[in-house]
Amino acid sequence: MGQKLFLLLLLIVVSSSSSLFQFGISSSISHKSGDGNEEWGYVQVRPKAHMFWWLYRSPFRVKDASKPWPTILWLQGGPGGSGTGFGNFLEIGPLDSNLKPRNSTWLRKADLLFVDNPVGTGYSFVDNLGQFAKGDWDAANDMTTLLTKVSNNTIGLHNTPFYIFAESYGGKFAVTLALSLLRSIQAGHLKLNLRGVALGDSWISPEDFTSSWGPLLHDLSRIGSVAHQISNEIALEISDQIKKGMYDNATVSWNNLEDFIVTRSNGVDFYNFMLDDDMDPVVSTTINIESNSIDSMKLKGRKPSFFSYKNYKPGGEGNLDALMNGPIKQKLKIIPPDVTWGGQSDKVFEFFTADFMKPRINEVDELLAKGVNVTIYNGQVDLICCTKGVEAWINKLKWNELKSFLNTERIPLFCGKEKGTKGFIRSHKNLNFYWILGAGHFVPVDQPCVTLNMVSAITESPAS
């Protein structure tokens, strides 16, 4: 009778569990590919909060005792964009969304580590709503926990020069994470050779970006003078709300400003101001917002995140959602059956509304003061995180070398046999700024050649 009761209780527990981790699977689990070039796994960063990571070891690795092979951690934007999906299959990973080899993969210069960050993004998940990260520092703490467990126990990241590359909102994740990692390293909890942070088209100062949109689009003849004036008025309201610490209100006003600009510009693409939003083959913006309330934000067929992505269909193929929830999920084997890639991403943004419009300029300043190498790179035709806004927040840095940096001459960039100037770089001490010509928000996609050269220079990769 006792044994039957035990089996009955066990059956109830198993059948009512919402994930594999709730009935006995270890809080950390990993798996390797047959050739050993890939490794992935879950880390329980907090009770009932599980983060997914995926490491690619480069087949282009060069052994050079004087220049160790680097590792790049890629942080996607959103909040709620999946690095293992978007960054991996749409931008820099070894395969595209049709599972065809990508010639411009960043594996040519480094090993790549993708993490679905924050919890609830991509394959990462929480067992209840109370476990979502509630801001940039919560996300940084979770990522520090993950990297501590992965670096110390699983893949030995302490043996490699480690770089954080970020895109969009991922830039805010990157600077808070870097500071969190430095504290953990100093405390002796983490062995990691953090060598630099690279901020690609990053949402570091929302005030400076929203203030730039109206003037930039007016100069480009994309909006008229009346719309320009109204855009500036909304931007001033956002600036006032940020100064008063009314960040939730500022998020709603940002939403209103985007909606207004799209309407009055006849649908400009926020990721490439040379295009309409329905012309962009890779991404779509969150412009079709039907409500001013973030809590009830509804998008026409799109997920409510800062940077949402279309189901990428080059040539009518390559549906990313179908790919990640089909062949990739089957390959990985360890994704719980009831976890859907992106299934909780809609909720992630809601928990970041209080942090969404907060600037992270001070964090960049702190990294520079600590001697960390900081690289900023920006696409020329990006609107959402436009270069005009980036230059504005750089001028707000309190870094004691800022004047010398600003007075340093830019150097033009070229790429192989390609004709024409591809960009410019300005470097002084531990701050570098790359202007990438012809690129929108997604620099690696629009200008892969010069971007790979940039990655090589930042990481000092021994690859040719």
Image (cartoon, rainbow, N blue to C red):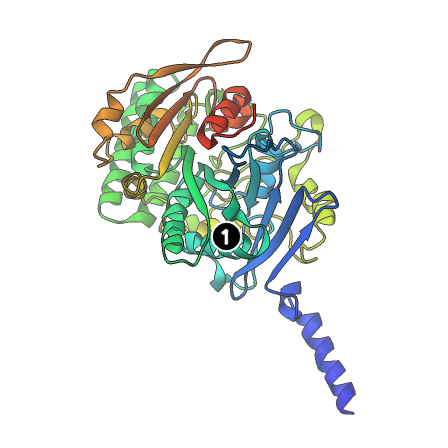
Task: Pick the residue in front: 379 or 353.
Answer: 379
Quadrant of the rendered image containing residue 418? top right
User: For mark 1, does the 10 Å Cα neighbourhood hold few (<14), some (14 to 19), or many (20 or more) residues?
Assistant: many
From the viewer's perspective, is 335 left or right of 163?
right
Label 1 SS: helix
Residue located 26% across and 32% down the image:
233
Q: Nearer the viewer, residue 267 or 362?
A: 362
Residue hosting label 1: 147
Percent from the top left, x then y, of residue 384? 41, 31
Percent across and percent down for residue 431 are: 33, 31
Residue lying furthest bottom: 1
Instruction: Tell me which residue sits at (54%, 20%) in the image.
Output: 449
- Numbered label tally: 1
Task: Please tell me which residue lies in front, 315 or 162.
Answer: 162
| Depicted 349 relative to depicted 111: above or below | below
Q: Residue furthest top?
A: 419
Give the percent coordinates (x, y) of residue 61: 61, 33
- Residue 61 vs 422, above or below: the answer is below
- Please give the name of the residue rendered at 61% of the width and 46% of the height, measured from the top-left corner: 54
Q: Mark yes or no: residue 75 visible.
A: no
Question: Which image quadrant: the C terminus?
Answer: top right
Q: Residue at x 50, y 33 (%)?
A: 67
Residue type at the position of mark 1: Leu
Is residue 36 visible in the rendered structure shown here?
Answer: yes
Quarter of the image with the N terminus in it: bottom right
